[in-house]
Image (spheres, rainbow, N blue to C red):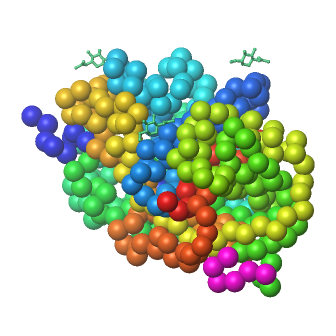
Amino acid sequence: MCSLHFNLLKLLVLFRLTDIFSPGFCEIPKNISDLISFGEKVRSLSFHLLNYTNQQKEYVVLAPYTLWNLVSLVAFTTSQDSWKQLHKTMGVSKLKGNYFNSFYNYVNNLMTTIHSRASFKIKRVVFYDSRLQLTSNFKDSIMDSGISLKMLNFDDNVLASDSANNYIQLSDSFLIPRRIIFDSSDFKETSMIMSAVIEFEADWAIPFDYSLSDRYVLRQSGRFFYTDIEWLRASVLELSYVSDSDFSMLVIRPHHGVTLKDVITNLALNDLDEIFQELYSDGLKEILIELPKFSLTSSLTLNDPFKSMGVMDVFSPDAANFSGISSDNLYILNIEQRVTVTVSEIGTTAIAYTPANVAKSTGRNKIRSSSPFIFLIVHGPSLTIVFCGKYGP
Ligand SMILES: *[C@@H]1O[C@H](CO)[C@@H](O)[C@H](O)[C@H]1NC(C)=O
Ligand SMILES: *[C@@H]1O[C@H](CO)[C@@H](O)[C@H](O)[C@H]1NC(C)=O
Ligand SMILES: *[C@@H]1O[C@H](CO)[C@@H](O)[C@H](O)[C@H]1NC(C)=O
């Protein structure tokens, strides 16, 4: 009886935001070990996704932190088998769902604190079709999580995408041009889109040296945290962003003869905390560092990686049970994300956007002789991976 339009749920992680924090979210968590454990749950999801996307693509960029949040919000509305499957990837029990989402909001609040030469913006919006009946519980939990809820007429998908783009751009100025956040095709055959738009832009604490760098390679000499980690089978270098921003990039290069895949597996199975401990206990070292100048764009549909992790039911019209969201039969059509990370002499820009209107620039400025590596953009105090990616096969 329902038209097809009622039956689909789409999750999009684009990147943008700001005005969402009510003062309640600023509370300092009482329990630091739980804060770190939130970060480790995001880490675990990051490397499982990276592992499963590793085979198909040479260059991958992910935005795990917000993906974790969006998927967890949906996960807590599911029941029975769907929940059991999602629980494995989120690592959080239902009872603790709200608790961990409060960490998300706390971390968000830390990250979006204004710094000069470093900015982090995020906007989360659930767009839903005017014919979809949402349960009041779901509406409440969305708004309690600091997410905006916006009803649109999805039937007119061109107008809906315009309205969505305007809605997002109005509350904050993003670097992403408004017209490319959503495309009208995003609003086809769907009745709800959970989205997040994030932008991160920060200068390096120590900019790369123009006189040493060339078109392809950034160079710098100085004192950095750098170490070889035996269990990881890789070297780790920390490049900090401007001093008070709390963000840094970890560059992880496999040891000779070790593949990226091996290192990703090690990262999936061990705490990030251990890496930082080894890095800092080894102390600052005087070194010459080289990093390819790069701009990577990933447009990924993550259904298959999630399926490989055993999350099946939520994607199936027959098996999904989202009665917590709506009495209409919903299932997840797509979990998509679109991310661009650009690294230059001065710093890093990371955004996500809709690929349809943008030329794919993957591999632009590719350095011919660079060895492959993994990079993580980490928020230090919470050990949360905001962006991660791999460069090279
Ligand atoms: C923090 O949480 C952990 C696990 O949830 C618990 O074992 C520990 O006792 C808590 N610490 C404090 C100070 O409440
Ligand atoms: C969906 O889950 C709810 C809550 O657990 C349950 O009451 C309902 O019977 C389920 N629906 C189906 C079709 O299994
Ligand atoms: C990585 O992916 C492979 C399949 O490609 C799977 O067998 C393995 O268990 C995965 N490892 C982790 C740590 O997820």
Identify the residue at image location x=54%, y=33%: 144
Q: Main secondary structure of the magenta part?
A: loop
Identify the residue at image location x=40%, y=76%: 359
- Front residue of 95/378: it is 378
Q: Is residue 299 left or right of residue 21?
A: left
Regarding residue 123, the answer to whether it shows in the image is no
In this rendering, is residue 297 above or below 375?
below
In this rendering, is residue 46 above or below 87?
below
Number of marks present in the image shown: 0
Q: Is residue 259 left or right of residue 253?
A: left
In this rendering, is residue 117 above or below 316?
below
- Magenta stretch containing residue 216, yes or no? yes
Furthest residue toward front: 257
Q: Is residue 346 left or right of residue 104?
A: right
Residue 339 percent location from the top left of the image:
50, 60
Kindly indicate the quadrant of the structure image that contains residue 303.
top left
- Magenta stretch containing residue 208, yes or no? no
Identify the residue at image location x=85%, y=58%: 224
Residue 211 percent location from the top left of the image:
80, 85
Regarding residue 266, the answer to whether it shows in the image is yes
- Front residue of 116/232: it is 232
Kindly indicate the quadrant of the structure image that contains residue 281.
top right
Identify the residue at image location x=59%, y=50%: 258
Ligand 2 occupies quarter: top left
Residue 207 percent location from the top left of the image:
80, 72
Residue 184 percent location from the top left of the image:
29, 63
Q: Quadrant of the N terminus?
A: top left
**Residues rendered magenta in the picture:** 212-217
In this rendering, is residue 168 above or below 267?
below
